[in-house]
Image (tube, rainbow, N blue to C red):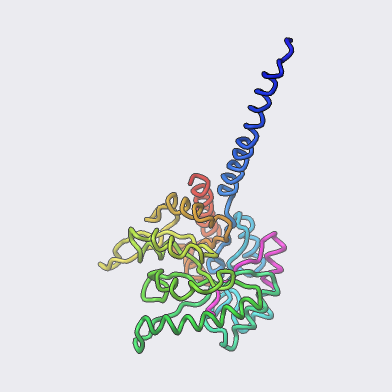
Amino acid sequence: MNNLSREEFLKLSAMGLAAIPLLGMKALEDANVAALNQEPKVHLFSKHLQFLDYDKMSKAAAELGFNGLDVTVRKGGHVASENVDRDLPKVVQAMQSYGLTPELITTNITNALAPETENILQTASQLGFKNYRMGWLEYSEAHSIPESIEKFKVQFAALELLNKKLKLTGTYQNHAGLHVGAPIWDIYQIIKDRDPNYIATQYDIRHALVEGGTSWALGLRLIQSHIKCIVIKDFKWGQEEGVWKPINVPLGEGMVDFSAYFKLLKKYHLNNIPMSLHCEYDLGGAEHGDKEISISKEAVFKRIKKDLEFLKNAWQRS
């Protein structure tokens, strides 16, 4: 082999050094893509398994492939508010025995000063939960909407202080209808000055699309900095007894464009926050949280599993 001249050696060395930053950028780019496509942490809304006890519920969720359960801690839920000290530890013990992570609970909490609020949240925090869904608020006919928004700002500021003390995030779900938060812009006004580590939103694409129509992406863009939990479900418009209404359907059979939606979640770096899967179409009563169901539990599990697989596949494709 011929010896390289000094000039040729320096030229090749320079080319190699110049390539190092490009290789580094490529590796970083590949790592970012991998992180965005990493499977989301999906928790099953425990309302759909209220026909099972804590152990059987946890076993089913684990076998279906969920990371955890979004546990109902409210009247009619898996854990009644007044029994949280006794029953929530039992839920966590059952969950952990099957490898599930306690992260999400669903409550009716709207006021830091309500009698049961601090006990529920303190118990949840001590057990390792990080995020609770709040109850819904309504607009009073006795006050204008701007007046109500100012009142709710004060209410949420008090909850923020309690959440900070307990290291919890309170998330408010946007729910279609005449609820506070349905149009998105109003809940943004209420929480925009709150620390999203303690007061945030649980963004529900189904309800956002019902209310937002073709402009739902603007609402998502507005509120994205304060989203700390995602609810996944689907719907289509249909008639029941001659009345047009949103009808809940399995994922992929309705109007939600999951490809566009998941791309936006990744764009806004919302790929690492927990998801709660809601299956509110016909599950023989399990969709409503019934304690007794009209179809087999295996049929319920099969439908839930299909939704989970759709979610994961749609995420990878987006």
Q: Please provide the residue range marked out in magenta.
A: 90-109
Q: Quadrant of residue 210?
A: bottom left
Q: Which residue extends farthest left?
A: 242
Whether 311 is drawn above or below 191: the answer is above
Q: Is residue 82 left or right of residue 173?
A: right
Of residues 207 and 69, which is closer to you in this image? 207
Residue 86: where, in percent of width, then height?
Answer: 69, 80
9 drawn magenta? no
221 lies left or right of 298: left
Locate residue 65: give its quadrant. Answer: bottom right
What residue is shown at x 59% (from left), y 74% (from top)?
Answer: 78
Q: Give coordinates of residue 242: x percent, y percent.
A: 25, 67
- Asked if residue 232 is positioned above or below residue 15 in the image, the reply reads below
**Residue 206 drawn at (x, y percent):** 42, 62
* The N terminus: image quadrant: top right
**How many numbered discs, if any?**
0
Residue at (71, 15) in percent of width and height: 4
Q: Would residue 302 be seen by someone viewing this image from the given angle? A: no
Q: Residue furthest front?
A: 7
Q: Residue at x 40, y 76 (%)?
A: 179
Q: Is residue 200 above or below residue 267?
A: below
Any part of residue 197 in sight: yes
Q: Residue at x 68, y 23 (%)?
A: 10
Q: Nearer the viewer, residue 129 or 10?
A: 10
Q: Nearer the viewer, residue 139 or 219?
A: 219
Name which quarter of the figure residue 40 lies in.
Answer: bottom right
Is 108 contained in the magenta span?
Answer: yes
Indicate the position of residue 245 as horizontal and vertical percent values.
Answer: 32, 66
